[in-house]
Image (spheres, rainbow, N blue to C red):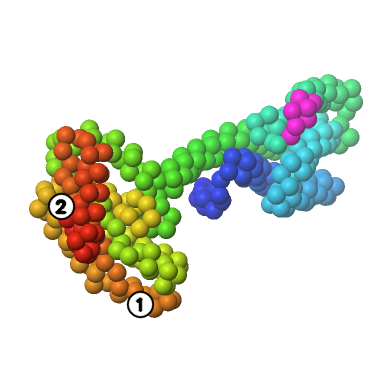
Amino acid sequence: MNYFYRYIDAKYFSSEDSKNLQLQIFLSVMVTIAALAHVILSVYFLYTGRYFYFTVSTLGFSVHIIALIVNRAGKIRAASFIYVFAIIAYTFLATFFFGTNVNAQWLILLAFLPTVLYFDFTKTQKICLVIAMPVLVNVQQVFPELYSPPVIMENSSFLKFFFTNTIVLGLLVILAVNEIIYRKLTELRTKDIEAYKNMCNIDPLSMLNNRRYAEIYFSQLIRSAHENPCIFCLIDIDDFKAVNDIYGHCAGDIVIQSVAEILRRNTRQTDMVCRWGGEEFLVVMRNCSLKSGQATLEKIRQSIENEAIQTDAGIIKISITGGAKLLTDNNIKSALEGCDKKLYEGKQNGKNRIVS
């Protein structure tokens, strides 16, 4: 079973990729079972000295191996046709040689059910096969009554047992594999959706939350902010334009990533840190008094001031200025405007400071 999971996990899923992978895995399982069935029959015929039937079963095994190779090459529809028509051909041969008493005519169900459930045939092809297969079963039921099988099997109990159980096992495998793959793909699609949502909420440069996520966070924060104090702080990298002009934009990107990492290291999991835009960051600390928040923000400021940022253009030293505000009466807009004013005040009074 782990084979399925490893095989599925290794793939990237668009809806079309998912469908093709589902078909490919399913077909691989069915063709493998059919090939193994031919191996068992070949051994039986060889053991009983029926070399002609041994040759036919060996040929059937070879055809299914070809189908498996074609399927692995990604030619799923071609492999499906090989599988279906190999089953039909072998069903007719077995019924012709052994009669209906060994139940080989019902093998056609192992081509019928996958065709309806899975195989990537066109609608017209499926309709034709759905109509043809019951007709083929009935032809096999009636036709042998008009003649005697060319070879009278002294003991057909093994073949009757074999074909009956192969049909039952095959149908159970079809349904079981269908359920396993469906559940796993559903689980992975759910993970993909969650990953996509996370991608939409993450800034790709800093790997912090982005402004879109902050808006969602604010709506949740309003419902609980009245219970506990909450600190907002807007942080801006001082003279960032000069960094870009002197060292280049690649160095500027490294500076943003370095600041983001320091913010990440010095805040709690319950805090929200996002890249607000450009060289601006927003920190929201929940369940935090103004005094405690000031101490954390000052620690962040000092860490950034002391950081020697290594870039291809050389070592860069930077500083930040921040404006902090306590959230009151659930007014997010007012808190942000307050942070912006405090930030402007810090810039006017020499930068490299946190104003609250």
Determine whether 252 is above or below 315 in the image.
above
Q: Earlier in the sequence, mark 1 or mark 2?
A: 1
Q: Residue furthest left?
A: 291
The percent position of residue 45, horizontal first and vertical second, equals 77, 47
Q: Main structural element of the magenta stretch: helix, strand or loop?
A: helix
* Residue 231 covered by magenta stretch: no
User: Which of the pair 56/17 is nearer the observer?
Assistant: 17
Query: Which residue is identified by label 1?
Result: 315
Query: Which residue is identified by label 2?
Result: 356
The segment highlighted magenta reads: 121-128
User: Which of the pair 33/27 is nearer the observer?
Assistant: 27
Q: Residues within 10 Å of mark 1 (few under 14, many from 20)?
A: few
User: Which of the pair 279/18 is nearer the observer?
Assistant: 279
Q: Residue furthest bottom?
A: 314
Hey, what amino acid is under mark 1?
A: Ile
The percent position of residue 192, horizontal first and vertical second, equals 48, 44
Hey, what amino acid is under mark 2?
A: Ser
Q: Quadrant of residue 300?
A: bottom left
- Distance of mark 1 from mark 2, alpha carbons? 31 Å
Could you tell whether 290 is left or right of 13 in the image?
left
Q: Residue at horizontal 68%, vertical 52%?
A: 72
User: In this orientation, does residue 353 appear?
Assistant: yes
Determine whether 190 is above or below 238 in the image.
above
Count of residue discs = 2
Label 2 element class: loop
Q: Residue at horizontal 58%, vertical 43%?
A: 14
The percent position of residue 293, horizontal first and vertical second, equals 15, 53
User: Which of the pair 212/92 is nearer the observer?
Assistant: 212
Q: Residue at horizontal 38%, vertical 55%?
A: 278
Q: Residue at horizontal 41%, vertical 72%?
A: 246
Determine whether 84 is above or below 39 in the image.
above
